[in-house]
Every structure is written in structure tokens, then in C-alpha cells.
Amino acid sequence: MNRSSGDCVGDRRGALAAALTPSSRIPNGRTDESTAVPSGCASHCVVTTSDRAGRLADRSVVRCMGWEQHTSVRFDLRGDVILVVAAGDVPSITRQGHLRLPLAVRRRRRIDAGSSLVVVAWPRDGILALCSPSITGEMILARITQPVTCSQDRT
């Protein structure tokens, strides 16, 4: 089912698929626990939801980062993106292995229960980034629609 609006979706879908690397695709669009985390990959990306307590439903990004329960993390708000690194004062990984977003972060980014979030983990760099699907779409669209510049010698 196509949930996107506009008549240009089909034209951009092919460009978007070509821009994604195989390691960043989610098999069968699944985001549950059965989605395998590629070992040794540079990044891992999922779309998940937040519950009313701020817990992210998908735990694969936490496992990919190697974070365990009671890991203390720091949340940095950078524009529309929330960056998470394991260097904070607040234990934000629950006993069940869910990342819990603090209330202050959820309020500032207007994240309600059931809100969808795109989460990208870069385990080698120790960075986790979260943002809304609409922001992700805008970033990707801006990237793939940049004009291609070629330098030509005019003699």
C-alpha cells in the first residue's frame, strides 16, 4: 500500500532505491525482533515507534550498538535530529533492552505514544540518531535532488 501523497512518488522511488546501500535496507520492510542485524556493518537503520513511557519498540539498534541494560547515555538535540551516545549520566536502557527517551526530549521533539521514528545506528562511531520519517524524507530528497555539477574545459 502506498501511503505517500503526490504524483511524483513513483519517479523518486527508483532514485531512492538506487541511493540506498544494501547494508542499510531492511529486509521485507520488517522492524521487529526477527530483523537480523548485519554483523560488521557500518550502519543499521530501522523505523520504530515510541510508547507512552518513551521506550522504542525495536531493540535491534540497542543490540547493534552493544549497549546493555542500565547503560547511561547522553541525548543531544541537533536541529531536527536527536543524537544519542553512551557517555551520559542517565541510564536509559531498560532491563528489557529498550532505549527510553526522556520526557524532556520527547516534549521538545513532540514525540507522542505511537509516534514513528527513524533510528540509525553507527556502532563503530558509537552514535545513534533519531528523527521523524518526514525529516528523513526531506533529507534524502534534498540529497538526491542536488544538481550534478560537471567541470568541462571550454577552449
Image (tube, rainbow, N blue to C red):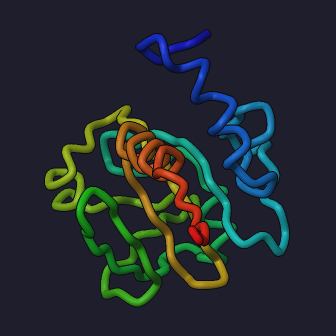
Which residue corresponds to the image point at 66% horizontal and 57% vertical from the top-left? 60
Quadrant (top left/top right/bottom left/bottom right) for the C terminus: bottom right
Q: Is residue 47 left or right of residue 133?
A: right
Q: Position of residue 96 (x, y in %)?
A: 57, 58
Quadrant (top left/top right/bottom left/bottom right) for the N terminus: top right
Q: Position of residue 139 (x, y in %)?
A: 42, 50
Q: Position of residue 95 (x, y in %)?
A: 53, 65
Q: How many marks?
A: 0
Res 52 quadrant in image: top left
Q: Residue furthest front?
A: 155
Which residue corresponds to the image point at 38% horizontal and 70% vertical from the top-left? 83
Camera-nearest residue between 139 and 126: 139
Camera-nearest residue between 117 and 73: 117
Which residue corresponds to the image point at 78% horizontal and 57% vertical from the top-left? 23
Q: Is residue 28 left or right of residue 116?
A: right
Res 43 quadrant in image: bottom right
Residue 4's place in the image compared with 146, above or below, is above
Camera-nearest residue between 20 and 109: 20
Res 80 quadrant in image: bottom left
Which residue corresponds to the image point at 71% horizontal and 34% vertical from the top-left? 30
Q: Position of residue 144 (x, y in %)?
A: 53, 47
